[in-house]
Amino acid sequence: MKFSLFVHMERFDDAQPHAALFDELTDLVQTAERGGFETAWIGEHHGMEFTIAPNPFINLAYLGARTARIRLGTGTVIAPFWHPIRLAGEAAMTDLATGGRLDLGIARGAYSFEYERLMPGLDAWGAGQRMREMIPALRGLWAGDYTHEGEFWRFPKTTSAPKPVQRPEIPIWVAARDPNSHAFAVENGCNVQVTPLASGDGEVETLMGRFNQACANAPAVPRPQIMLLQHTFVSDSPEETARLSQDLSRFYCTFGALFQNKLPIEQGFLRGVDAAVQASMPQYAPETIARNLVIGEPEAVVTRLKAYEAMGYDQYAVWIDSGIEHARKKRSLELFIRDVMPAFA
């Protein structure tokens, strides 16, 4: 099982400038590369300081010049916010800038907050349909002289300029949860990215089951890769484990409030995530977070990850976004590299 890093710029207040956050993100990716990580993933989000990532290709192209080996992936771009010609060209240009190290993760998106601002009236179903139309269009554009007559986009014969460095194409990863998404990804020869969020190992097993069923239903298609994305922190003491559980509880309550789109957002910051709001989300209580996420001292983390490897996951993405300070993120990452990864060598 290979390891990767899922990372964004993030902040809960304006005490730290964006320039410092950018440098910290770079530091984490370079640390991951030195430690032997396979990929660094950066997603797309808009208008929120909780996850600062308006165009991951900019970050990835920059990181391409400051790294040498680690692959660089979009985790993920939001399909309905892109035109196929633009996405094909920007992905190919980023593949060129990174020396053929791009992985293209793509999803329908999740936040109604973003739908309301970039595509008013869009819902999850419509977003998913756009994603399904987007993927074959990308492949056609990369091959060249491609004409598209679809439900959402129409354009005459067009070729991506530039074309990707990688052949036959840039690896495509689809964020999947429900069985139909798994089936679409597998049938179309795409790798699959899954996350249980904070639902625990039962959901980890369910997601693998859906992927396996999709593979069984498409025996003529070579089995793609599947990656598990999960918040993962290595501590050096029970006290730090407890502190991390509190931190991730706060993070998930903020995530939940953003997803519900019910609290005010001012200057990009979500306001009002207080004790009452946190109490209204018992699924994110610290004790539940401690049980459902991968937080603990090295031996405990190795045991959890060995179980995921046994299930058949090809790649495990360490989700490091958490709202904690950079020094603690880096310390956890360094402990992961030093004390966890050797068990999987």
Image (cartoon, grey):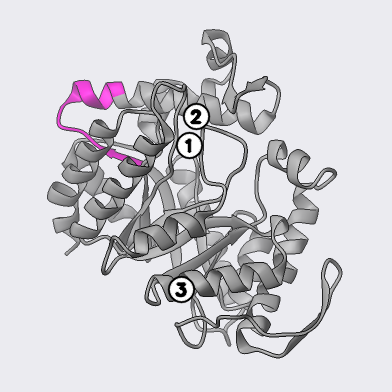
The disc label shown at residue 95, or none: 3
Q: Nearer the viewer, residue 219 or 339?
A: 339
**Does 87 sit above or below residue 239?**
below
Residue 71: name its quadrant: bottom left
Mark 1 / mark 3, whichever is N-terminal: 3
The disc label shown at residue 252, or none: 2
Q: CA distance from mark 3 to mark 2?
A: 33 Å
- Labels 1 & 2 near each other (Cβ < 8 A): yes
Residue depicted at x 15% and y 32%: 236
Mark 3: few, some, or many residues within 10 Å (few <14, many ≥20)? many
Residue 320 placement (x, y as % from top left): 36, 41
Q: Nearer the viewer, residue 274 or 345?
A: 274
> Which amino acid type is shown beneath numbered disc 3?
Asp
* Mark 1, residue position: 198
Q: Secondary structure at mark 2?
A: helix
Residue 23 placement (x, y as % from top left): 32, 43
Mark 1 / mark 2, whichever is N-terminal: 1
**Does 195 sit above or below residue 239?**
below
